[in-house]
Amino acid sequence: MLKVTIGVALLLIIALIGYRQTFTRLRLPAGARLIFLTGTEFILIGVALGDELIGLLDESTIRSLTPLLSLGLGAIGLIFGIQLDLRKILRFPSRYLLLAAIQAAFTMLVVFVPFLFILRESFGDEGLSSLLAAVVLAATAACTAQTSLALIDGEFGLRGTGTMGLLRYISSLDAAVGLFALGLAFCLMHTQPVVGFSVGLGLQWFLLSVFLGTALGFLLQLLTQHRCSDEELVIFVVGMVLFSSGIALYLKLSPLFINAIMGMLVVNLPGSRDRIFGLVVRLEKPFYLVFLILAGAIWRPGSAWALPLAAVYLGLRFTGKIAGGALAAGVATPDARPPLGLGLGLISQGGMAIAMVMNYYQLSSGPITDVVVTIVLIAVILNELAGPSLAMNLLRRAGEIAR
């Protein structure tokens, strides 16, 4: 118990320090700032605190923090859902939404099909665990980090420019495709029906997930639509996230998915959506840093195949983003066609991929889980390092950054 208490206290202290320092405008050269301000260095802090080194945040300690982990997953899901404001999404041309969906779906397909075969052959598993692992890898591959693009935007004053505007739009939405697939995949793992018949088990559980997110979203909207104090608002929001995440954990569903639906509903209904948005924005960074630390702490290579498979994943995701971006650009009208190299601006992977693999870790265990975690964490680190430079090269070629 003492070890758990120390671990939680240390997590909170590091998150507070990181919240105050990591995301501020430090006096660094442009290139260094874009690398260090993405926050991925906290993964390495987690590795140092985990089983492989100090051992303060070992697996048993992290498993005992399941309620905290569920709260964090729910909060990140809510934060993502709050961003899906239809009023803001529909301000942009409808082709933007199509471009985002095409490149995300294509990237997922490029990663999913090979890894379904690779994992089944590597682990001798023809069942649902390889299917779930392949879906998790595909879902995380669809994600694009918003942080790197936001830093480039602020660094070079690109607000309002065409290609950067499109990249930021896509990066805010493409994780929704992966999150949908992830939520569905967890539903497919169930073997017992929700209702009295066994036809369409996965669909039954998926509809239950959607219903829970919708019902809890309406409840949160009812609680906050009348004027309440800031303290009451915090209690309502955190309480609903705890409640929804607890239900998801009990039913072995995705708290990310359910809370994203809840957030999407709240932000598109009248009430206190602006105040809720302001609250979750303040909570986003510390939760993000806590997840980076926890992700590093659970990192165990798990298999001699983990590093080669990480290289394969990196290659497939890069191919998917480049080819998916080119495919999306190709279907656009000639008068509004983005660069064919659009995918170069979508390489950074970011926090939603971390949250997805943590959601998977929470509901799964075993050698295949360790390999998937290793693949995603290596990819996130390397993509965060390479992504800003690739995006800046794309923007230079598009004439939006002076050489």
Image: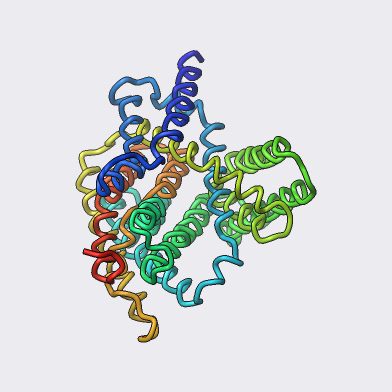
Q: Residue at x 43, y 29 (%)?
A: 17
Q: How many marks?
A: 0
Is 50 in front, or is 304?
50
**Residue 30 relative to residue 253: left or right:** left
Say if 56 sits above or below 349 in the image: above
**Residue 201 relative to residue 162: left or right:** right
Is 339 in front, or is 370?
339
On the image, which quarter does residue 370 sit in? top left
Q: Looking at this rendering, what residue extends furthest in the right direction?
A: 226
Q: Mark yes or no: residue 127 visible.
A: no
Q: Residue at x 35, y 86 (%)?
A: 334
Q: Residue at x 35, y 60 (%)?
A: 112
**Residue 106 relative to residue 260: left or right:** left
On the image, which quarter does residue 306 sit in? top left
- Residue 152 x, y percent position in the rendering: 34, 55
- Residue 172 x, y percent position in the rendering: 46, 59
